[in-house]
Amino acid sequence: MRFRQSASFALAVVALATAGCGSGSGAAGSSEAFAGAGVPARSPAGRRFAADTAVICQRLNAELKASKSATQSVHEIERLALPHAKLELVALKELSALKPPATLAADWRHLVLFRRSLAEQLVDLAKYARADDAVAIRALGVEKARVHRELRTLGERDGWEACSIVG
């Protein structure tokens, strides 16, 4: 029985690792809520704003990559989830302080919400890994995958590709 639980948990860990290392509370909404709400960052102000966001998100992505584990064991997930959440929160504070052009403001609010969801999901992931809760990890993996899709759609459309990268 213990082997069956361990195998099931390992499968959940692999599924979650495939979905990336973020978080999900559902607070971010969905692409239907913002589809077409903004315009791609093609104006001079939009390009400057995209460049400002890229600096912050590229730094975050490098920090996350530098601390990523070669293994996806439950122990490693538990060990890294909270430090990754802290990195997300530091970047989130900086991103939240940016002032987008008016035409991009609604989409920017959604992107910030998605990034906040990723940080929250990392905290949840650490808790579930500590509790060895494969069911909760699997459910979180599904929610994380949804947040990642929404974030990629928004980031690619509005020119914030660096901020749409997760994990």
Image (cartoon, rainbow, N blue to C red):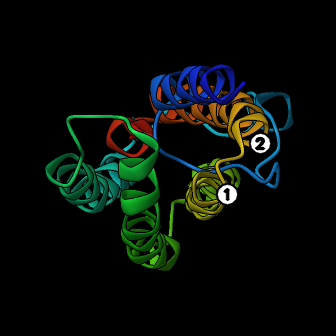
* Secondary element at image label 1: loop
On-image quarter of the C terminus:
top left
**84 sits left or right of 32 in the view:** left
| Whether residue 65 is situated above or below residue 84 in the rendered picture | above
Identify whether 60 is placed above or below 9: below
Give me the disc on residue 136.
2
**Quarter that holds the N terminus:** top right
Question: Whole-Å distance between the Cαs marked 2 and 1?
Answer: 10 Å
Residue position for label 1: 131
Please state the horizontal and vertical placement of residue 45, each as a whole percent of the image: 37, 55
Tell me the kind of residue under disc 2: Ala
Q: Nearer the viewer, residue 58 or 23?
A: 23
- Check disc 1: other Cα within 10 Å, few if <14, some if 14-19, many if 20+: few
Q: Is 30 situated left or right of 2 in this image? A: right
**Of discs 2 and 1, which sits in the foreground?**
1
Identify residue type, mark 1: Ala
Image marks 2 and 1: residues in contact by CB distance under 8 Å: yes
